Image (tube, rainbow, N blue to C red):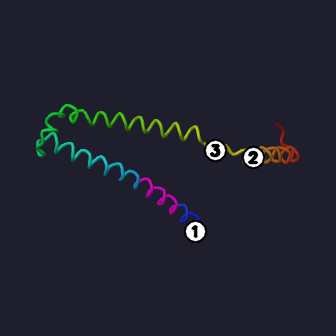
Amino acid sequence: MILIHKISNLNNIVLHRIMTKLLEWVSAASAFFAIWYSLIGGYVKHPMIENNMDVILISPIFFLILFGVYAVTVVLYRVFTFNNCEAAFLELQKQIKEANTELTAKGLKW
């Protein structure tokens, strides 16, 4: 019972961290779209905004492309810097050999 409780607490901690990161991205996207909508809706009047309206209109597409590049970069970085555990590999190989000898001694044939 205690083990199940500890595992469920661990899952809650992991979900909490994921939701926190999710909420950061949702908050940033909401702020961006609120500002973007106020600019294209004409709620903010300024000559600079009117002169650069074509850039403002395509800015969500630009930021979506930047987000895709960021996501691919993060995934590739994490893949290339993934740690190899040589000690754990050797220990696992040793345990497999021990298990094979014990099972052979008990009469199991491979």
- Observer-side mark, 2 or 1, equals 2
- Decide which of 109, 75 is in the foreground and name it: 75
Give the residue number, with chain letter if any, for mark 1.
Answer: 2
Contact flag, marks 2 and 1 (Cβ < 8 Å): no
The outermost residue toward the top is 54
Specify the amino acid type for callout 1: Ile
Specify the amino acid type for callout 2: Leu
Specify the amino acid type for callout 3: Asn
Q: Distance of mark 2 from mark 3, alpha carbons?
A: 16 Å
Contact flag, marks 2 and 3 (Cβ < 8 Å): no
Residue 42: image location, x then y, percent: 11, 42
Residue 101: image location, x then y, percent: 86, 45
Which badge, 3 or 1, comes first in the chain's sequence?
1
Which badge, 2 or 1, comes first in the chain's sequence?
1
Magenta highlight range: 8-18
Give the residue number, with chain letter if any, for mark 3.
Answer: 83
- Decide which of 11, 4 is in the foreground and name it: 11
- Observer-side mark, 3 or 1, equals 3
Image position of 65 (left or right of 58): right
Give the residue number, with chain letter if any, for mark 2.
Answer: 92
In the picture, which quadrant includes the C terminus? top right
Give the structural element (helix, strand or loop) at label 1.
Answer: helix
User: Is residue 10 depicted above or below 109 in this figure?
Assistant: below
Q: Distance of mark 2 from mark 1, alpha carbons?
A: 28 Å
Give the structural element (helix, strand or loop) at label 3.
Answer: loop
- Observer-side mark, 2 or 3, equals 3
Residue 64: image location, x then y, percent: 33, 36
Q: Is 90 within the magenta?
A: no
